[in-house]
Image: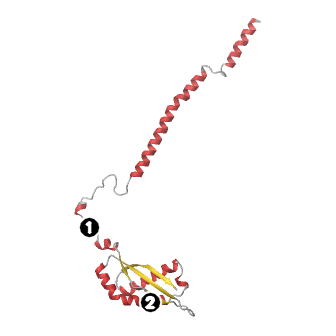
Amino acid sequence: MADEKIEEKPQETATEAPETPGAGAPAAKNKGNSMLPWIIIAVVMLVGAGSGLGLGLLFAGNDAPATPTAQPQNQPPAAEQPKADTASAAANNSWYFDLEPVVANLNEPGATRYVRAVLTLEMSGQISVEKGTALLEQKKPLLINLLTIYLSGLDIESTRGDKNLKRIQFEICDTFNERLFPDSKPLINGILIKEFAVQ
């Protein structure tokens, strides 16, 4: 009987040993603890790399490349190169010419309706301000006449809404360019409406 009791105790202790925290549990715990510093290091490195990339993109400019570009050997340095074409640079420097107010009766049968328009011409920089102003002052009676005839052909419906106003701007610009510059490139870039009142 004593032998039976001794044999039972080792079996019970053998089955109970893995369930109770013993020598095997600290080894698993230490294994998890040994991975934690590596995970933290990896996360810190990823955050650092991401923030470095983000700051680099934030402060990177489109003005100049980071590395200098090599110039072709047959061209002089940038300081000695000729300046860009003055005609293309002048094209960006548009200037403006105000027309006198024009009042015209609209084409409305049975009612007296009229439009009062005050326009500004946007002139290309390809024509100088002095030369262009002299030309426009000389041709101003023609421009006022063309504008009055054009506006008299409109009815009330063709003057309403932004689409109609944009169409009117383009048609006036085309008409003026055809009459002022028939054999050359158009020098009126656009028509600006200062006032367009229909009554």
Read off the residue under disc 1. 83
The count of marks equals: 2
- For the point 35% across and 88% down, the residue is 139
Within 10 Å of disc 2 (Cα), the crowding (few <14, some 14-19, many 20+) is: some
- Image side of residue 24 versus residue 135, left or right: right
Residue 148: image tag: 2
Q: Is residue 193 above or below residue 67?
A: below
| Rendered location of residue 120, percent (x, y) | 40, 80
Residue at screen point 57% across, 23% down: 27
Percent of width and height locating residue 150: 46, 88
Secondary structure found at label 1: loop
Q: Residue furthest top?
A: 2
Q: Is residue 127 left or right of residue 114?
A: left
Check contact, mark 2 vs mark 1: CB within 8 A.
Answer: no
Task: Name the image quarter holding the N terminus.
Answer: top right
- Where disc 2 sits, the SS reads helix
Q: What amino acid type is highlighted by mark number 2?
A: Thr
